Image (cartoon, rainbow, N blue to C red):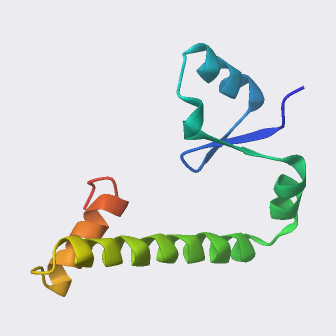
Amino acid sequence: MCPRIYRLSFRAVPCYEYLAMLDEERDLRDFEIVDDQTADIYRKMTPAGRLQIAFGLWRSAQSMLMNILRAQHPDWGIEQIQGEAARRMSHGAV
């Protein structure tokens, strides 16, 4: 029996969909398996609590990315760094 929830790029997918993806020979490093205990903890949280965790993770990723960009491009100004970070975090939508 497979765990109930699988996460692919921050999207929960049902077990049958995950197994279908495996048949497509996807790279298993793209998947994070969330165990039943962790899923139960998230289910018991309020929506505001889950959003608080998600926003904290997003802010952490943004901070790390901006620090990397500052180190890679010392000649860039803050606006250029923020713009590039926004572009990367929005997958090019910004």
Quarter location, residue 29: top right
Q: How many marks?
A: 0
The quadrant of the rendering that contains the C terminus is bottom left
Q: Position of residue 66 (x, y in %)?
A: 32, 76
Q: What residue is drawn where x is 79% and y is 72%?
A: 46
Q: Residue lying furthest top in this view?
A: 23
Q: What residue is drawn where x is 84% and y is 59%?
A: 43
Q: Position of residue 7 (x, y in %)?
A: 65, 44
Q: Is residue 39 left or right of residue 77?
A: right
Q: Is residue 12 left or right of residue 56?
A: right
Q: Residue lying furthest left in this view?
A: 75
Q: What residue is drawn where x is 19% and y is 85%?
A: 78
Q: Is residue 82 left or right of residue 37?
A: left
Q: Is residue 48 left or right of residue 59?
A: right
The quadrant of the rendering that contains the N terminus is top right
Quarter location, residue 41: bottom right
Looking at the image, which is closer to me, 37 or 75?
A: 75
Q: Position of residue 71 (x, y in %)?
A: 25, 76
Q: Residue lying furthest bottom in this view?
A: 78
Please say if 78 is above or below 26.
below
Q: Position of residue 54 (x, y in %)?
A: 61, 69
Quarter location, residue 13: top right
Q: What residue is drawn where x is 27% and y is 55%?
A: 93
Looking at the image, which is closer to me, 17 or 59?
A: 59
